[in-house]
RNA sequence: AGCGGUAUCGUCUAGUGGUUAGGACGGCAGAUUCUCAUUCUGCAAACACGGGUUCAAUUCCCGUUACCGCCGCCA
């Protein structure tokens, strides 16, 4: 069997989209599973929309997700260059080949003429297909048009190619995820393969690049199905081997529309900024269409690769459920080794003066606050009360600290606490005793603790109370408690 | 409009010509805890509809509906 070579070919007109990441993942998995090569190619034929910033973002995001490529713009490879704009001198030769064989022709139609055709089709409620006005232009006519200053685009002669290689106008192929697919090519207009400015169009450049890079399987979103028929015809007209195709369902937002910023993050880098772990992101996105044979959903990319069978991917669209991603993220945060967690939390702690705490206190703070984290960024709010002298009350905290019972508890707490030895173990004991004492007076343990918690942290909920007191320290605890007493 | 694709709990999905249709997230309830959360236990929740084929259909076929996609000198 020939070598498996797959590619991801993002267009750098934006940051790496989570949907592109999933397509990249499935390509990567397929390559891994089959000992093949995973290739990155940047499709930047549209210079207007391309920027280096986006290219860097694509590189960084893919790397962060662990989707390392074997060949690409930065690492090179035997079939470079891997950036489309650097391949512009390659395409004309193949355009000429098609022209010579009669599978392509020059089209002098102006944008206005084309626009008129489209408008007419639209008015008649007919699907728009190019009129083929320019197929049979004579040399004289072409010369005349050229003399007028018109620059021709090159169109592909769909019907000529179809009939040269197939018995009817129906073109079929076996999609490795969707199965047998077919299309009546008489409904496909002669499409442009080279723009009048000389640049190749997407459908053409993709074929040439995939052909030259010896891509064996093209795995991409199902929005490309209609392009596939066009591309197959180009391969055939060029006498090239047609790769296998596989089309994945799309990722939809919860309202079934296209996933866009208004639903939340869409770029991998935005998810990361919001505090998602790339491990969770890639695991989550794998579960959109793929399911583990052992029912164990939490898996690394390598583990998934072992269990991956492309033909078992669900071919339907799937909705991007942020809730499940969040659950998975919290799961991955829980599994993170302590030092790694600390490292990843640092960016979200920048607003605080970390020198207020000793390294021991800092570690303890993280230990007692890590449990409820859903996003790494949740740490910012979770540790707020460890810093600064004064307490910042939230609504419930303020209400709680001002109740009569709280005030009484605090008036009892301050003098007692002053004599406490401020160690973790002792605090645990003392607080337990303190709760018990108040329970005898008819105050529920949680009410007792609420008073202290509210006075010291400004809130009614948060981390383990013993730990909080330990980290905040005796002096600050007492100062805050005293201040809370009216 | 045309063409193509898809259809199992709200969501991601497993699965089968005869199953109590399974799991996960979310939801609800309970237990634990100094609070929130975590954790644990339990509960509710699905085969889109209509025709066939068959002893039997969620499963196979056809149609309908719904949804998604495509119809660019964008990629």
Image (cartoon, coloured by chain):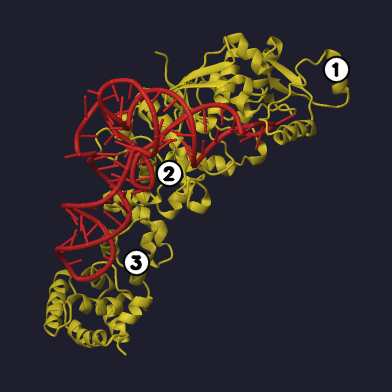
Chain colours: A yellow, B red
Mark 3 or mark 2, earlier in chain: 2
Badge 2: how crowded within 10 Å, few (<14), some, or many (20+)? Answer: some
Using the rendered view, name the quadrant where residue A408 is placed: bottom left
For the residues beneath circles 3 and 2, the answer to whether they share a chain is yes
User: At x 36% / y 44%, what residue is drawn?
Assistant: A279
Callout 3 touching callout 1 (CB < 8 Å): no
- Comparing A114 with A275, the one in front is A114
Mark 3 or mark 1, earlier in chain: 1
Against A107, residue A403 (above or below) is: below
Task: Measuring from the top left, give residue B69's x and y in whole percent.
Answer: 54, 36
- Comparing B15 with A442, the one in front is B15
Q: Which mark is residue A429?
A: none
User: At x 27% / y 78%, what residue is drawn?
Assistant: A477
- What whole-number distance in Å separates the C-alpha atoms at marks 1 and 2? 53 Å
As helix, strand or loop, the secondary structure at mark 1 comes to helix
**Please, which chain is the residue tagged with disc 2 on?**
A
Using the rendered view, name the quadrant where residue A50 is placed: top right
Mark 1 or mark 2, earlier in chain: 1
């Amino acid at each position: 069997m020939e070598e498996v070579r797959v590619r991801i070919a993002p267009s750098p007109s934006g940051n790496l989209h989570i949907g592109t990441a999933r397509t990249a993942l499935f390509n990567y998995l397929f390559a891994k599973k089959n000992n093949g090569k995973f290739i990155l190619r940047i499709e930047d034929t549209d210079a207007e929309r391309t920027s280096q910033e986006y290219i860097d973002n694509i590189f960084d995001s893919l790397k962060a997700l662990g989707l390392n490529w074997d060949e690409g713009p930065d690492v090179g490879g035997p079939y470079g260059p891997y950036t489309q704009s650097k391949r512009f001198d390659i395409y004309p030769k193949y355009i000429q080949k098609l022209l010579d064989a009669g599978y392509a022709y020059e089209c002098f139609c102006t944008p206005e003429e084309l626009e008129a055709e489209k408008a007419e089709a639209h008015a008649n409620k007919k699907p728009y297909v190019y009129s083929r006005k320019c197929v049979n232009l004579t040399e004289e006519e072409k010369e005349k048009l050229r003399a007028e200053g018109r620059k021709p685009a090159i169109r592909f002669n769909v019907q000529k190619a179809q009939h040269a290689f197939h018995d009817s106008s129906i073109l079929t192929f076996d999609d490795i995820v969707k199965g047998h697919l077919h299309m009546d090519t008489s409904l496909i207009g002669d499409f442009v393969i080279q723009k009048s400015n000389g640049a190749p169009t997407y459908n053409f450049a993709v074929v040439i690049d995939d052909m030259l890079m010896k891509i064996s399987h093209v795995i991409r979103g199902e929005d490309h199905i209609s392009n596939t028929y066009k591309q197959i015809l180009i391969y055939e007209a060029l006498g090239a081997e047609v790769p296998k195709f596989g089309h994945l369902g799309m990722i939809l937002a919860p309202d079934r529309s296209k996933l866009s910023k208004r639903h939340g993050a869409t770029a991998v880098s935005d998810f990361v900024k919001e505090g998602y772990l790339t491990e969770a992101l890639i695991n989550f996105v794998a579960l959109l269409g793929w399911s583990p044979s052992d029912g164990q959903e939490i898996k690394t990319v390598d583990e998934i690769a072992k269990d991956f069978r492309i033909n078992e991917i669900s071919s339907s669209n799937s909705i991007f459920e942020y809730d499940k991603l969040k659950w998975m993220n919290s799961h991955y945060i829980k599994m993170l080794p302590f030092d790694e967690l600390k490292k990843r939390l640092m960016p979200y702690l920048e607003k605080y003066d970390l020198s207020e705490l000793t390294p021991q206190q800092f570690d303890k703070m993280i230990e007692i606050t890590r449990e409820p984290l859903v996003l790494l960024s949740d740490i910012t709010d979770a540790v707020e009360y460890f810093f600064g002298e004064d307490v910042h009350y939230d609504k419930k905290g303020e209400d709680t600290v001002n109740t009569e019972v709280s005030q009484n508890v605090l008036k009892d707490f301050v003098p007692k606490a002053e004599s406490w030895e401020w160690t973790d173990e002792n605090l645990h004991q003392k607080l337990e005793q303190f709760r018990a004492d108040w329970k005898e007076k008819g105050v529920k343990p949680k009410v007792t603790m609420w008073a202290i918690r509210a006075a010291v942290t400004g809130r009614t909920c948060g981390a383990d109370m013993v730990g909080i007191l330990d980290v905040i320290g005796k002096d600050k605890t007492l100062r805050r408690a005293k201040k809370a007493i009216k």
